[in-house]
Amino acid sequence: MMRRNMAKLAVSLNKGAWETMPVVNALRKVDIGKKNQILTTEIKTTGTYPVVDQGQSFIAGRSDLEDRVVRDDLPLIVFGDHTRCVKYVDFPFILGADGTKVLKPKEELFDAKFFYYALLNIDIPNRGYNRHFTILKEKDVPRPPLPEQKKIAAVLGTIQKAIEEQERLIALTTKLKKNLM
């Protein structure tokens, strides 16, 4: 929720001055799919490679299935077709099973990190456990000049790291309090 609010803040600051374009026109084809996916039953708690799926947790688990690892064309954005979760992935990973869409913005149009934050800003109504990518494809995304995108993404990245650190400290403090009681 906090990431969505950060993205809304940055993207709405100058929205009227930027052109927009449909999400579907901003994407380029990526050659990632079933060959890189593993079933939920194949996800382990330990392993060499992280598994990124459509769930709420950023990393669903781990695996040692070397032949499934996505290494090329990073960074990528993983969109949960059922959950509407959006994840920015800039490291080698294995794709979780059904319901994931791997997205890559056209580099000449978008900075990948900015595009990720812009996707977080898009309101996609919850239709339960139905497909949501069809809705996302019809939405528009703002497109400021590339240098401005990079600056916005850098600022939002710094804010995001600070928020994550604050959340980590709160969790640690809560755990300490619980242990002291």
Image (cartoon, rainbow, N blue to C red):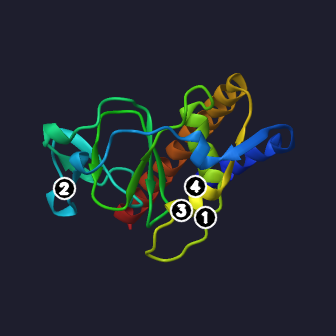
**Rendered view: 20 above or below 151:** below
Q: Position of residue 145 (x, y in %)?
A: 73, 27
In the rendered image, which residue does mark 4 sit on? 137
Q: Is residue 10 visible?
A: no
Q: Nearer the viewer, mark 2 or mark 4?
A: 4
Looking at the rendered structure, the kind of residue marked 2 is Ile
In the rendered image, which residue does mark 2 sit on? 43
**Rendered view: 181 above or below 1:** below
Task: Return the disc, 2 or 3, that comes first in the chain's sequence.
Answer: 2
Q: Is residue 59 visible?
A: yes
Q: Most extreme residue toward the bottom, as rendered?
A: 128
**Figure quadrant of the N terminus:** bottom right
Camera-side residue: 83 or 9? 83
Q: Which mark is residue 134?
A: 3
In the rendered image, which residue does mark 1 sit on? 124
**Total numbered labels placed on residues in the image:** 4
Q: Name the secondary structure under disc 1.
A: loop
Q: CA distance from mark 2 to mark 4?
A: 29 Å
Q: Residue 20's image quarter?
A: top right
Q: Most extreme residue toward the top, as rendered?
A: 147
Say left or right for 133 vs 93.
right
Q: CA distance from mark 3 to mark 4?
A: 5 Å
Task: Return the disc, 3 or 1, that comes first in the chain's sequence.
Answer: 1
